[in-house]
Amino acid sequence: WQVVEAAHVGAVTAVAFATDGRTLASYSVGDNRVCFWQTSSGFLGGLLGSSAKLLKKCTVSPVTIASKALLMDTVRLVWVSEHKLMVLKGNSQSFSLLC
């Protein structure tokens, strides 16, 4: 987990594993960036070990919310296919990223 946090400026706001468990996406409101990670041993290897490899960083538009306390409920990452991630921001903002 420390490997993922080190790639962001600020706390990690949202994470999501691809359905195969080999790719992790992380998002931080601190740097408005989504990072894509390759994990060598699935879920636990990506979180607990240092085996995660950074594949790609994408800067996205900032989240506009009334309170930082609402961030965890506001931003969600959803894999819609093996290589496509949806970033959902609140009720009205969303966009897709390719891994």
Image: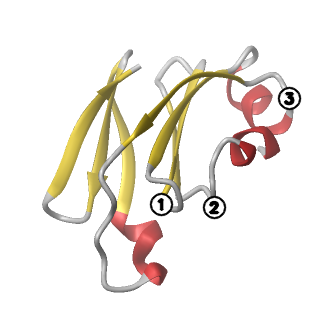
Gap in angstroms between the C-alphas marked 1 and 2: 7 Å
Depth order, front residue of 28/18: 28
Residue depicted at 25% across the width and 33% down the height: 96
Q: Which residue is mark 2?
A: 10
Question: Where does residue 95 sit, x and y in percent of width and height?
Answer: 21, 41
Q: Earlier in the sequence, mark 1 or mark 2?
A: 2
Q: Earlier in the sequence, mark 3 or mark 2?
A: 2
Question: Where does residue 73 sit, x and y in percent of width and height?
Answer: 39, 69
> Label 2: few (<14), some or many (≥20) within 10 Å?
few
Depth order, front residue of 18/1: 1
Q: Earlier in the sequence, mark 3 or mark 1?
A: 1
The N terminus sits in image quarter: top right
Question: Where does residue 83 sit, x and y in percent of width and height?
Answer: 37, 16
C-beta proximity under 8 Å, tags 1 and 2: yes
Q: How many marks?
A: 3
Callout 3: SS: loop
Gap in angstroms between the C-alphas marked 3 and 1: 23 Å
Identify which amino acid the numbered label 1 is placed on.
Val
Q: Which residue is mark 3?
A: 50
Residue depicted at 31% across the width and 76% down the height: 65
Residue 65 horizontal side relative to residue 94, left or right:
right
Callout 2: SS: loop
> Label 1: few (<14), some or many (≥20) within 10 Å?
many
Q: Which residue is mark 1?
A: 29
